[in-house]
């Protein structure tokens, strides 16, 4: 059965709206012709869903795609002809954020007492990062390459955490969700969260069509109520997700190179 934080939150919102929840699963494609902004716009504009969860709230993600039409991503229930159709794009709007997606440091057992207030505190330590991720970009650009010689890249996060547990790495610089996923399916003995959170983090919310403003307003009211009662934090704990509250502003600026160079 499907489970997880996003599903718990969606179920709670649907219940409060007095509506039945229908989940439209889709696959994020890894090719030059697609990205999340286009995929989300296609699914919403085609009426495949009214809201899309776990959407990063950035100025760039709210822009209408430059192309007037986009392709649908692979989705559950798709027919052969759906792969050939072009969807006219629409303007989108987001709800208020419900959590912060952030990068963190996880330490191996012998480094458990290490204080990590800045990435510079990891100097001289062997640091594992998932290849071609935001944490990779930060690790390689930090203070003009200060950590480069100590960074080890991993194409498979399972290998990263296994080597951290074996003491072959001193630390892992990863998305907090990645560590949560590992802990939910594996023994996390010997792995210690440092509490460090990088400043380059993104509020997450729902995105919908701007023309469906009434629904977005209703969801905003529900999210505000759930946050006031700390229900969202409790849902995250139930789902095994490290909950970090959203921060101002709701919609963040686009990522600049200088942000990759600091803490």
Image (cartoon, rainbow, N blue to C red):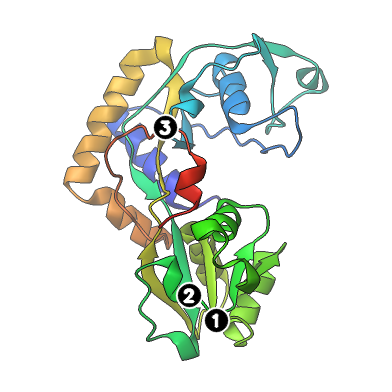
Q: Are the two marked residues, 1 and 2, in contact with CB atoms closer than 8 angstroms?
A: yes
Q: Nearer the viewer, residue 184 or 99?
A: 99
Q: Which residue is mark 2?
A: 122
Q: Is residue 81 above or below residue 157?
A: above
* Residue 183 point in image, percent of width and height: 51, 71
The answer for how far apart the CA atoms under marks 1 and 2 are is 9 Å
* Residue 204 point in image, percent of width and height: 41, 40
Q: Residue at x 39, y 74 (%)?
A: 194
As drawn, the residue found furthest toward the bottom would be 110
Q: Quadrant of residue 20?
A: top left
Q: Is residue 85 visible?
A: yes
Q: Which residue is mark 1?
A: 170
Q: Residue at x 38, y 73 (%)?
A: 116
Q: Residue at x 72, y 31 (%)?
A: 74
The answer for how far apart the CA atoms under marks 1 and 3 are is 36 Å
Q: Earlier in the sequence, mark 1 or mark 2?
A: 2
Q: Residue at x 43, y 32 (%)?
A: 58
* Residue 181 point in image, percent of width and height: 53, 63
Q: Earlier in the sequence, mark 1 or mark 3?
A: 1
């Amino acid at each position: 059965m499907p489970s997880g934080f996003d599903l718990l939150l969606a179920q709670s919102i649907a219940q409060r709206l007095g509506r039945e929840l229908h989940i439209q699963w889709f696959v994020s494609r890894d090719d030059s012709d697609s990205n999340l902004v286009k995929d989300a716009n296609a699914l919403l504009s085609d009426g495949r869903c009214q809201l899309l969860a776990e959407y990063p709230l950035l100025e760039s993600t709210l822009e209408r795609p430059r192309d007037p039409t986009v392709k649908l991503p692979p989705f559950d229930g798709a027919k052969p002809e759906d792969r050939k159709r072009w969807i006219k794009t629409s303007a989108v709007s987001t709800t208020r954020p419900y959590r912060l997606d952030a990068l963190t440091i996880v330490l191996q057992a012998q480094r458990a007492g290490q204080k990590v207030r800045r990435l510079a505190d990891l100097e001289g330590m062997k640091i594992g990062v998932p290849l071609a991720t935001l944490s990779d970009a930060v690790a390689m650009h930090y203070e003009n390459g200060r950590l480069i010689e100590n960074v080890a890249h991993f194409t498979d996060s399972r290998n990263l955490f296994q080597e951290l547990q074996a003491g072959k790495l001193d630390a892992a610089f990863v998305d907090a969700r990645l560590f949560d996923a590992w802990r939910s399916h594996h023994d996390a003995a010997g792995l210690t969260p440092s509490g460090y959170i990088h400043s380059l983090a993104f509020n997450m919310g729902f995105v919908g069509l701007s023309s469906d403003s009434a629904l977005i307003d209703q969801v905003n009211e529900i999210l505000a109520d759930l946050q006031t009662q700390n229900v969202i934090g409790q849902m995250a704990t139930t789902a095994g997700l490290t909950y970090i509250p959203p921060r101002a502003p709701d919609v963040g600026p686009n990522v600049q190179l200088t942000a990759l160079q600091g803490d």
